[in-house]
Image: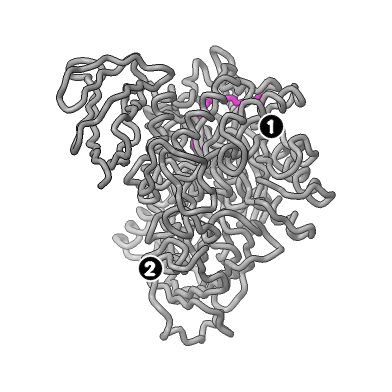
Amino acid sequence: MRRIAITRLPPRVAATILSLLFLCLLTPARAAQDIPLADRWRFLKADADNASAPTFDDSGWARVQVPHSYNVEDSGIGGAKARGEPEGVYYRGPAWYRRVIAYQPAPGTRTILHFGGATLKADVWLNGRRLGTHEGGYAAFRFDVTDVLKAGDNLLAVRVDNARNTRYAPLNGDFNIFGGLYRSVKLITTNDLHIDRMDHAGPGMQVRTTGLTARSAAISARIAVKNDRTSTVRFSLKSRIVDAAGKTVAQGTTALSLAPGEARSVDQSFTLRNPHRWEGRKAPYLYRVVTDVAEDDRTLDSQTVPLGVRTIAVKPDGSVLLNGAPYRLYGVNLQHPTRFGQGPIVTDAQIDEDLGIFHEMGATAIRLAHMQHPPRVYERADELGLLLLTEVPLIDDHDPSDAFRENLVQQMRELIAQTGNHPAVALWGIGNEIRKSDAASNRILAELQATAKTLDPTRPTTYAHCCLEDSDPIAQHSDTVSYNRYFGWYWTKSEDIGPWADELHAKLPGRPIGVSEYGAGASILHQEDPVVKRPESNGYWHPEQYQTDFHIKHWREMKKRPFLWSTFIWVGIDFPSFKRNEGDRPAINDKGLVTEDRKVRKDAYYWYQANWSDVPMLHIASRRDVQKRTQRVTVAVFTNQPSVELRLNGGAWTRVKADDHIASWTIDLAMGDNNVEARAGAGAKMLTDKVAWRYATRP
């Protein structure tokens, strides 16, 4: 090799080169960078032979942007077209995405291809070379493409298939499975000495609070690092804990040496003095843990994860302890986020809106049904102080094969790796409503339990049970168990939830039991006050007033039973489900407290807000029952105030004491139009509400 001596170059040129070399030594290397792959995709809603080949002609395919779902337009699934067919129909099968990536590899770097989610199976090729397959629709996954990318144009091809497949979960469920690349796709570039982001597509860092006293917190961090160079390297792993004001409050450095191609997990420990605790809704204080890979004082790679200093436990008597103090968990189930006309292509702002609705209601916790949710759900819950139950998609049905069980274990590993740093995550869910208790069923749950406890011993586990005996062995694997019970909707009457809970608690006195689902359908278009009889759950007529009465009775029973470690309403928001043909429109589950478009909060929402929220509120119920059928009616006002003043048609105000968050007032309506007003408080803080009702005798 011919060498050029800098000293033989013209003085000015030599000086310039030396200056650039000196600057390179002083300038920190770039941390990991994201390159979004959002536009210029070609798409085909069908299978195609040889579509992975770079020479394949896709000029006739549609142009789309990613995130993208190929079911958004389908009838029956919540798209721009009418739902139409009873029970809904939508395409479940393969589709193809192709895109050219213009790329210029940089020496000394690695490049990772990141998929935020693809439902349910994705086969991926780059430049005609098969990268691999990912099975499971709700977690992120990655491929290291450093050795496959070339300078210039690269052809990325992805075959996605949302058809039911007995190799992977879910096999069933009361929700639609939107096919496609429905979350972001991007390239991640890192230094070839880096924090390893290939561990189940997590951040390469797992941070936990392992001890907490009045004056200090013990924080442990496990960081995965890898040397992809061809020579041994010596470097430092520098971590620091940064408070909400940006101040470093703890730090540590570990000197390391890695051989070529070697990967290693490094444990670091920190002590925080007088820490700010993450205390749920009261004080969701967040730190950040920042870890740098440094060589010769140059930062080669960096990663940041959230830290909330908190501990969580569930005692045998059903008490939930947050930081060692009792903390009641009550709230709603949220199905995987969707929007009408968008399917699962939701924005961060829309996710924030959803969680804000239930934070405003006063919920302390949310059960994320029935799969891993988008990253923003976990981030926003951290910020709002909402505790989360998050679970793998083992729903109703399962296959006894090794492949199915191993896929579920993989999905549990992905769930924990990708969301485990979030303090909002309180419990890992290992399944929902398994309908048979045989050897294969119990083995699946046993392995999921073991996986969760091995990967994260700091959090308890839970399982949502139904359809078998309450004490069946299938419900005994997890640390806690909760039950999906619909007294008063599918069977018997609403008040039966209390005696059932008492009987089960007596039968299992040392077992933490909760209620993971309870609810009733309601249409804001169906008004019946008072309700004459229980509606048919699978019928058309779902009056809003029945849902309200259902929830009043359920909450009054459940709040008297502190041994119920959790209570979660099914469901927070109406959502599309192709299986449904009931209520005011087909292919919708209408048990939500909020309509699918988020424009209307049903009366039951305000009942819970009156019980759960500390913010003063009042709400006149049955407001949409405009055409009254009887002259004598009872006005029900939900409130967290001690009393409410009411008046009819501008008359005198009548003060009514609230009895368990309801102020009731019986009145006789005038013929024609009537106005009912309510108020509570005084001055600038006065609360007001009003409704307009009409009464007229039938001809």
- Whether residue 114 is visible to the viewer of this picture, yes or no, is no
Pick whichever, 622 or 399, lies toward us.
622
Which is nearer the N-term, disc 2 or disc 1?
2
| Disc 2 secondary structure class | loop
* Kind of residue sitting beneath label 2: Lys
Q: Position of residue 357 (x, y in %)?
A: 38, 38
Q: In this view, does 258 lie to the left or right of 287?
A: right
Picture quadrant of residue 267: top right
- Whether residue 453 is visible to the viewer of this picture, yes or no, is yes
Q: Where is residue 505 in the image (x, y as percent from the top left)?
A: 71, 24
Using the image, tell me which numbered label, if any, was put on residue 237: none
Using the image, tell me which numbered label, if any, was put on residue 480: 1
**Dot in front, 2 or 1:** 2
Using the image, determine if residue 151 lies above or below residue 318: below
Residue bearing the label numbered 2 = 81
Pick whichever, 623 or 132, lies toward us.
623
Taking the magenta stretch, the answer to whether it contains residue 290 is: no
Q: Give the range drawn in magenta.
A: 306-314
Q: Position of residue 124 (x, y in %)?
A: 58, 70
